[in-house]
Image: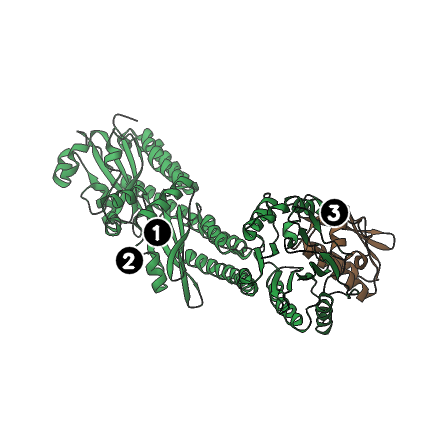
Chain colours: A brown, B green
Amino acid sequence: MAGLSVEVTAAGDRSLVRVVGELDLDSAAILRRPVEAELSAEPAHAVTLDLAELTFVDSSGLALLVELRRLASGAGVQLDIVNVRPGPQRVISIAGLAETLGVPPAPPHE
Amino acid sequence: MAGRAGFAAPQDENAARLQQLARVTSELGAAETIDAVIEAAVKHLADAIGAAVTTLMLRDGDELVLVGGHGLQDGIAERWHSFPIAHDNPASEAAREARPILVRDRDDIAARYPDMVDDTPEGRSVVGLPLGAVGVPVGVAGLTFDEGWLPGPGELDLLMTFAEACGQAIRRVRARAEAEESARQLQFLADASAELAGSLDYRSTLAKVADLVVPGLADWCAVDVLERGELTTLAVAHADPEKVAWAWELQRRYPPDRDAPTGARNVVRTGQSELYESITDEMLAAGARDEEHLRLARELHLRSAIVVPLRVHDRTFGAITLIRAETARRYGPADLAMAEDLGRRAATAIENAQLHSATSDVARELQRAVLPADLDTIADWQVAAYSQPGDESGVGGDFYDAVPLPDGRLAVFIGDVMGHGVQAAAAMASLRASVRAFMSVDPAPAAVLDYLHKMFDLLAIAQLVSLVYVVIDPDTASLDLVNAGHYPPLIVGKDRTVRFANTPPRRPLGMERDVCRSATFPFDATDTLLLFTDGLVERRTENIDEGLDRVRDKAEVLTGADLQEGLRLLVERVQRERGDDDVTALAVRGA
């Protein structure tokens, strides 16, 4: 199992969270903790989730992304999800979550 | 050193030997291992005092065991490997009476120890020195001199000083070894606790217990646990896997006697530990069913055993058996205390693992209980279902059902609680019931989805749930559906045309609601509808579209007469490379 790794760095006045690997039920906690910490950090700052190296996401992973967006909006912190690969992008689109997660919808599949 | 021996030499030589003896005695003071003591006592003593033969015997229970010899004739070491302290010979007598025994010559031997005549060459004198005569001697040094020489009183005092130093050295080395063993055991228990605490799977916990113990604390370890009232051996460990296989075979051929008065069964019955410092041949014979069994048991060379209960609070649910075979050291009370401690820690870990697996079982049972069992009896419709909870969590969040409506239409739905575990299974159970309830008010897809959204809002349910809900109408040869964030259903025509019922993506339940609009697709009596969850199409190494294509390409297998068999084949072909999520699929066709 490829697993998941998360790396948090400062990028200007916001935090950049690099998400590498596969996001699923088992690995959700690995992403949840550091992002929760960033969202509640003082002083409040925007957070970017960079999914350029996220190769797989399942429904538990989608649920976590939605939860993090909810946490961010509750805390009044901006959380952007960027560089989503075509695979996860399709899964997000099929689940009807593209708009919620601020991800461009994938072209429909024929 | 041959010829006329020991202190009977001229004065200056005598002084030199006294010096050597003093040196050997001080050497003993520095000895750190039993082997070093033996080396000093046997070899160096022989050189120092010019004995023809020196031997060292240590007490082991009621016996003296020969642990070292110098100048011994062939065959003597084998014949006198061990012998009872009660036996009539100079060494046994020295050990019994804690005083030096002197035997002048062969006639003297013949008179006092008739059994020994054949082992004593003509002209030899024999001296037995108790080691550590202050208290119970730990052993005996045996000396044989040529030409019948015997030490005088002063010389005997010196030899006894040496023997006392020898006994002290042995006691010191042993005490230190015991202290080290205790420290090692404490460390082991600390390590074991950490290992076991991290283990949530019941059987792997048991295997871990057995593996932790071998070979450091035991040559064999078996763990027996009560399962449904039967004591069952769940783990056996030995450093040699072939021996493990052999032990299982032995147990298969000779199942343990349920009413045995000793051993694991008795320990589970009484909750009391058992310690067998020495396993005797009589014990083996008493436990054996027949000659063959006894022969096999003897081959194991079992020496010593401990059986401790696995107990939490007052409940004993198993036993750990530790056995020493190849390792010479026997178990004692200190080992028993350590094993009991291990038993307590393992029992706690096993109970945790059992609780955990019981929780998983609850979720699995819940899922089984709430999934419909009677879909194949719906009049006018063929409905096939396939449900396989994921391997990893063992508990899925998938739910589905098919309900005939009074006007001849059929409502079918499938959904996925996005997350797993008991919570998901519980949510799933209530969702299926909710959908059925709303359906009875108004079965129209848009209405059902609207009710569900209202319910999620009202109860502030944050859990995300994807759902496809379909109503098939045979009169109009069409179906209406709503899709809230789920994979699109597949429609398979009798002519094997296959198409997804794609609709614009809508958010799952548990989020702000979309405008509820249903979509309509043609669907006649010969068409087959396939609903499924992510486990059928998702693979970690590929884009989801490839998974969808794979299902579409193989879906024609559903056009066969037996829909249930067709569904089974489809899942099998699609899942040939293992997926690790729940696989749930539902296929529907007019009868």
Q: Mark 2 is on which residue type?
A: Ala
Q: Locate residue B484, reporting x and y percent.
A: 73, 61
Q: Point out the tag, 2 or 1, that comes first from the N-terminus.
A: 2
Q: In the picture provided, is B425 more to the left or to the right than A96?
A: left
Disc 1: host chain: B
Of B304 and B391, the residue lying toward us:
B391
Q: Can residue B240 be seen? A: no
Of B322 and B208, the residue lying toward us:
B208
What number of labels is visible?
3
Of B226 and B148, the residue lying toward us:
B226
> Which quarter of the picture shows residue B586?
bottom right
Q: In the picture provided, is A85 more to the left or to the right than B63?
A: right
Q: Compared to B529, does B495 lie above or below?
A: above
Name the residue carrying label 1: B305
Q: In the picture provided, is B575 more to the left or to the right than B290?
A: right
Q: In the picture provided, is B521 more to the left or to the right than A48?
A: left
Find the residue positioned furthest to the front.
Answer: B475
Q: Mark 1 is on which residue type?
A: Ala
* Mark 2, other Cα within 10 Å: few <14 / some 14–19 / many ≥20: few
Identify which residue is drawn at 26% across, 34% down: B78
Identify which residue is drawn at 68% across, 68% down: B443
Q: Locate residue B55, reporting x and y percent.
A: 29, 36
Name the residue carrying label 2: B260
Q: Mark 3 is on which residue type?
A: Gly
Q: In what element is the residue under mark 3?
A: helix
Q: In what element is the residue under mark 2?
A: loop
Q: Residue A87 got which mark?
A: 3
